[in-house]
Image (cartoon, grey):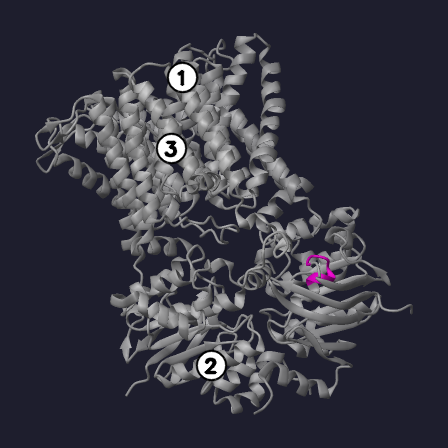
Amino acid sequence: MDQFLAFTVVGLSTAAVYAVIGTGLVVTHATTGVFNFAHGAAGMLSAFAYWQLAVGWGWPVPLALAFVLLVLAPAFGLFVERVLMRPVQALGEAERLVMTVALLTGCIALARWVWDPNTARPLTPFLADRPALRLGPAAVTWHQAITMAVALAIAAALWVLLHRTRAGTEMRASVDDRALAGLTGADPLRATRLAWVLGIQLAAVGGILIAPAVALDAQQLSLLIVSAYTAAVFGRLRSLPLTFLGALVVGLLEAYLAGYLPQNDYLPGLRLAAPALLLFLALLAFPHRRLRGRDRTPVRVPLPTVRGSLLLAGTVVLFALVLVTVLAEDDLLSYGTLFPLGVIALSFVPLAGYTGQISLCQLSIAGIGAVVWGHLGAHGELWALPVAMLVTAAVGALIALPALRLSGIYLALGTAAFAVVLDRWIFTLPAFDVLGVRITFFDQGSVTVSGPDLFGLRLTSPSQLLVLSAVCLALASVGVAALRRGRFGRRLIALRDSEAAYATLGGRLLVTKTAVFALSAGIAGLGGALYGMQLQTVTADQFNLIAGLPIFLIAVIGGLGAVGTGLFTGIAFVLPAQLMSGLGSWVHDVTALLVALAGMGLAHSPSGVLAQMRAEWAPLGRNRPLLCGLLGVLGVCWLLAALDVANGWLLLAIALVTALLLRVRAAAAQRPPTDIPPEWWGVRRPWRSEDGEVLSRATIAAG
Amino acid sequence: MSGPLLELDGIRAAHGGITVLHGVNLAVEEGRVVALLGPNGAGKTTLLSVAAGVHPPSAGRLLLGGRDATGIHPRDLARAGVCLVPQGRGVFPNLSVRDNLRMMTFTGRTHEEIEEIAYARFPVLGTRRAQPAGTLSGGEQQMLALARGIVTDPAVLLLDELSMGLAPLVVAELYELVADIARQGVAVLVVEQFAAAVLKIADHAAVLARGRVQWQGHPDSSLHAELSSYYLGSPI
Amino acid sequence: MPPLLRAEEITVSFGGRRALDGVSLTAEAGRVTGLIGPNGAGKSTLFDVVCGLRRPRTGRIRLDGRDITREGPARRARRGMSRTFQHLELFGRLSVRDNLLVAAELGPGRRHAARTADAVLARLGLTGVADDAADALPTGLARLVEVGRALVLGPRVLLLDEPAAGQDAEETRRFAALLRSLADEGTAVLLVEHDMSLVMSVCDEVHVLDLGAVVASGPPSRVQTDETVLTAYLGEVRP
């Protein structure tokens, strides 16, 4: 009984933290419509800032607290509102989601860069020197008591704010009917700002309260928040009392699981994964109001030509050959990951690009692919590769079933929860038997992965594996492009644009959605197997949720609808980090931060940079003499590098500069006729017979 | 009296590339109720939005007290006394009656004053002040929307489809209240698809169809035939 | 012989409010059946029930006398039912031609989908905009594309929800001719429309819906002069 009480006290104080954080999430989401994936990361940054002030610089605790909660947190909230969210407010839900995912990645990278993760940073609980309070048989530390008191005080203060002040009334009014609130003199911007400030402040309070109980670790603290997300989903992202209730359920559940779960090899992970599992279940159990309203600026899905996709495939293989001949053996392994990662990124294209379903667990699925291949293909058995793809496709189909009920942020949240369940529990399981089949994941350690046996030719050297990955990426790219041109691709886009119309035309939603989830999971599984081969040994860490976010972000930057996104993501993810890897260990964090910043910036051009790049390079592609010149220069550079006669950096620079110069030249040489504004048609260029029709259609469209 | 308070002069307006109003002229004088009738899709709501400054006209002028008010920001129009009660219950369903009224303190009145005015005119709201507006009956919600309008002391009141989804008796009662408001010197422009109720209190009626005023004048029996042909097509 | 489509005693409630209250009506092959009534009368809700997007609380939908109430929308589409939407539901990211192609590939003519789609484009005079993105079209044209998409399935029952909104007088006249020719080919057309001149000129029979119930039915000439219908539109008629 005493033990039970002790667990209850622990559970209640954890629940208090979750309640505070979850409340912040709900306040922001309900008022602004933005689900802040970086909410936990904001709490994490606040905890670090508090440590820096109170411990690092020795400020008095009250001063440090006041500075973080009253200056830094509000400033951060206002920054997020003004700089990140306002520009994408008019865009779709997906863009806002990408923004907060970028913010999450950026916060983690920033924290790891500023505060070296290898140094321990203990935070003492509040009033740790005082003896614990005794309530009958139970002992309550002062920190726990303060945590609970703070949660109750915040609940009371929020009630007063929302029900007794004009500003709070305005916030609730904006939740009810934003347009009407604007009509009746309320300032929607003020309500939005207030919601962001409040939300971040609450995240900060939660982060500071929970940090002493766990290690001050950027990744762990940001993810701890999954529990708070679960609480918020209990409140359906609207109701504060229900959020408190949800926090209570999650907090107590965690404490009792910690106390009463039998000690064996299979269950400790379950305790860690419980909040995510609960989040997944809560998402499925609660009815969600379907988010109405279509994207105001739908992102076009480019239609690749046969020639274009073959050209892309050729480029991929050629690029691989260049790398193989130019790079040293050691570098081949690290650079080589760009092709498998490209394949994983390509798996976003049919799913997110064509169908509009955002999945954040593609890298985790790739992890399954790597493990299956690692175990079944240990001696290079080629049949194991399609089996790995089939297994991952089956996992994808499994995810599709709940996905039918979820959309938008709820799907993103559900797949994120799935990824967390995988890496906290499933991937940590030791081997077990199901119906006589032995199932092994990472064997509580690492798995050795070797190359396949291609009809007697065993691929083992880095250069062979690299070329294999590149060929796979090329084939997958051509396949995805063919998909877009064909019947299935049309159906996917149709399904995304209107599920109602698709169903009333005789389309089966369940079949189509399951198919696309399975397909994209299969691609990710292939990528995972190749990634494993390149890495040689894989651990669960390499496939967790946080590791997958930058890949998602870069794929968004490239443009989820473009087939070239695979190659683009591989290059953008691997090359900068590798090129600068000599400079120090901070490079990794800085590149992650750059990715995040690019994600924030590029939410402004939702169709991605690839479309833009294509437009910029197209003139050069059409200009035969200049193109031949460029290819010649590139060929010579390649030859010199391959023979190792000149410095590689110098040659790279020459190749890049030549390419850019020729691009400018080609653009100048061939002014595309559309550049002449319509009012000059017939003046600066001859009037064509079709111009009249073009103009009249343009005026109709512009209205 | 010095001319109409609200005047729409040659208003043209478009929605998504399609012109829905082709030059509409309409005037509302102080203390009078003008009913704007017509079948669905005739452009009635668009015209009201133009009058409230929410929808910019592509041509024509909006005159307020004889002065050109075209292109003025809706919030400034609201402060100048133009009040729009939008279609479909202009209330916040999860806010209490009191909080709904509290949202109108931007006019400078304290919320005690606002509540006093509102409850004096609509006593039933006073008895429900702590209830969430969403739990009120349809008629009471519409009264609350009206109350939110009149506490701003409007010179011009623009009402869009007050009767939507309400029983005929409730509608009649609501329009009696509207008539009361007009008698205190407010210019009222009412858009209504269900003509009968509003015609009992209207001083002037206009029928809008296919983006043009097809008929206007004093509401009498000739109007009935007009309406029937616009709503149901001319008899074959 | 039973009527092609029959809705029997359909009742639908939204949060306690009856949106449809025991509505029964039929649509016969080769006839255009009009469905009119003021805003909020329940016309679009009835369409959702008929095509299977919404389950009624009580009542049945019969096609050829067979009860299809429990079948989903895809199943009903394969039985020969197709519809358009009051709030456009085009596949905006696809070209006009691809919009029709998606439907053709799902329909009975999937073997020669491209030919089916092109034939419908030509019939509706949409060949000129076939390669335009669907979401770039003006409303009137976009509605016509939705009609085309529904026609590609070669439906026996065609449900049209305000197809003529946003069309000018000339376009409406051509559209009326199209509806007549569809009916002559044996299609059962159910038409919700606010343009009364269109309804009254093409419909064989008109049902008037008010506050979730059918208040009058009959040929256009009778409905037009029916006092209950006028009451539905105008409220209580002035004495």
Amino acid type at image mark 3: Thr
Q: Are marks 1 and 3 on the same chain?
A: yes
- At mark 2, the secondary structure is strand
Amino acid type at image mark 2: Gly
The tally of labels here is: 3
Please rate how many residues cluster around mark 2, counting C-alpha atoms within 10 Å: few if below 14, some from 14 to 19, many from 20.
many
Residue under label 3: A569
Is disc 1 in contact with disc 3, using a CB cutoff of under 8 Å? no
Identify the image quadrant of the N terminus of chain A. top left
From mark 1 to mark 2, how far is it between C-alphas? 75 Å
- Give the magenta range: B49-55
Is disc 3 in contact with disc 2, using a CB cutoff of under 8 Å? no
Of the numbered discs 1 and 3, the one sitting upstream in the chain is 3
| Residue A213 visible in the current orientation | yes
- At mark 3, the secondary structure is helix
Whether C217 is drawn above or below A545: the answer is below
Front: mark 3 or 2 = 3
Q: Are marks 3 and 2 on the same chain?
A: no
What chain does mark 1 sit on? A
Residue that appears at 57% across and 28% down: A201
Q: Considering depth in this image, is C147 or C96 the residue closer to the camera?
A: C96
| Residue A217 visible in the current orientation | no
At which x and y percent is residue C96? 43, 62
From mark 3 to mark 2, how far is it between C-alphas? 55 Å
At which x and y percent is residue A152? 53, 30
Q: Considering depth in this image, is A411 or A563 the residue closer to the camera?
A: A563
**Does A643 lie within the magenta span?**
no
Identify the image quadrant of the C terminus of chain A. bottom right
> Which mark is drawn over residue C34?
2
Residue under label 1: A649
Is disc 1 in contact with disc 2, using a CB cutoff of under 8 Å? no
What chain does mark 2 sit on? C
